[in-house]
């Protein structure tokens, strides 16, 4: 899968220039601090100290803590990969690829997204930044993926039930640890694609991947 652009160029218009390497260093530090102390306890002072930056520079580059945190999540892999980067030859393969990505770092990054999502319920600025930077672009891209499947003849149309798929898929990342007390894995998420998403979209004639175990 192509690596997500970590420079944030499109989102940094009007900011002073910063090298991609330095930006990645800052984002990694933000994610490390989030894992250590959580969103609410994270401060711009702590980020400045960890990265040997000035707090003024951080505010000049990102404007606020919510914007910095969401940019770090978006650019450094804790958020889902852009749907347009999925490399499957068809819709089902692309969804399976997304499932494998989600399973790869589920324990580490899902816990991180869960914590930030909880904080967003009480922080309107964080919620808005999450919606604008991560959620809406991914939902729009997923819709585009479905529309391309229609153009290729895989789907006759985009069924209304497709609107529920993103909620169902990412809900699994949070629900399985709560219900089964274990994190999701590749078999579980790819199984969701094959047993739930494929029939839901009317793609029941698509064969399962040959590398999945059969009973």
Image (cartoon, helix red, strand yellow):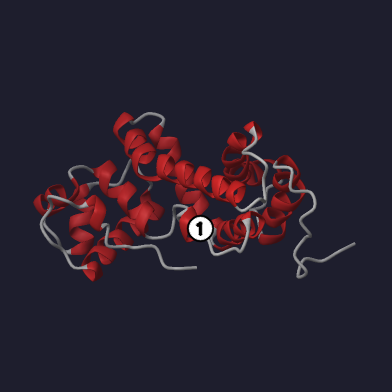
For the point 67% across and 61% down, the residue is 186
The answer to which image quadrant residue 178 occupies is top right
For the point 29% across and 33% down, the residue is 125
For the point 24% across and 70% down, the residue is 21
Task: Classify 52 as above or below 171.
Answer: below
Q: Nearer the viewer, residue 186 or 203?
A: 203
Classify residue 155 as left or right of residue 142. right
Q: Residues within 10 Å of mark 1 (few under 14, many from 20)?
A: few
Q: Nearer the viewer, residue 124 or 10?
A: 10
Q: Position of residue 124 (x, y in %)?
A: 32, 29
Q: Position of residue 109 (x, y in %)?
A: 48, 55
The answer to which image quadrant residue 211 occupies is bottom right
Q: Position of residue 59 (x, y in %)?
A: 14, 47
Task: Classify 73 as above or below 143.
Answer: below
Task: Classify 97 as above or below 122.
Answer: below
Q: Position of residue 67 (x, y in %)?
A: 26, 44
Classify residue 112 as left or right of residue 99. left
Q: Quadrant of the C terminus?
A: bottom right
Classify residue 147 as left or right of residue 24. right
Q: Nearer the viewer, residue 141 or 47?
A: 141
Query: Tag 1's secondary structure?
Result: helix
Q: Which residue is disc 1 drawn over? A: 108
For the point 25% across and 53% down, the residue is 10
């Amino acid at each position: 899968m192509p690596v997500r652009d970590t420079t944030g160029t499109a989102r940094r218009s009007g900011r002073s220039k910063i090298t991609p390497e330095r930006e990645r260093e800052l984002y990694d530090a933000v994610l490390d601090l989030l894992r250590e102390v959580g969103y609410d306890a994270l401060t711009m002072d702590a980020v400045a100290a960890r990265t040997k930056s000035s707090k003024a520079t951080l505010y000049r580059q990102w404007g606020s803590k919510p914007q910095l945190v969401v940019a770090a999540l978006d650019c450094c892999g804790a958020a889902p990969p852009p749907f347009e980067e999925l490399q499957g030859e068809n819709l089902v393969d692309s969804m399976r690829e997304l499932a494998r990505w989600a399973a790869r770092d589920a324990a580490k990054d899902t816990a991180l997204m869960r914590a930030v999502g909880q904080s967003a319920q009480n922080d309107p600025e964080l919620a808005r930044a999450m919606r604008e930077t991560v959620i809406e672009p991914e939902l729009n891209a997923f819709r585009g993926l479905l529309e391309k499947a229609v153009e290729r003849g895989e789907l006759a149309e985009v069924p209304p039930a497709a609107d529920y798929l993103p909620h169902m898929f990412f809900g699994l990342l949070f629900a399985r640890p709560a219900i089964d007390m274990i994190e999701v894995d590749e078999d579980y998420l790819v199984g969701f694609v094959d047993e739930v998403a494929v029939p839901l979209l009317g793609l029941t004639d698509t064969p399962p991947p040959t590398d999945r175990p059969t009973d």
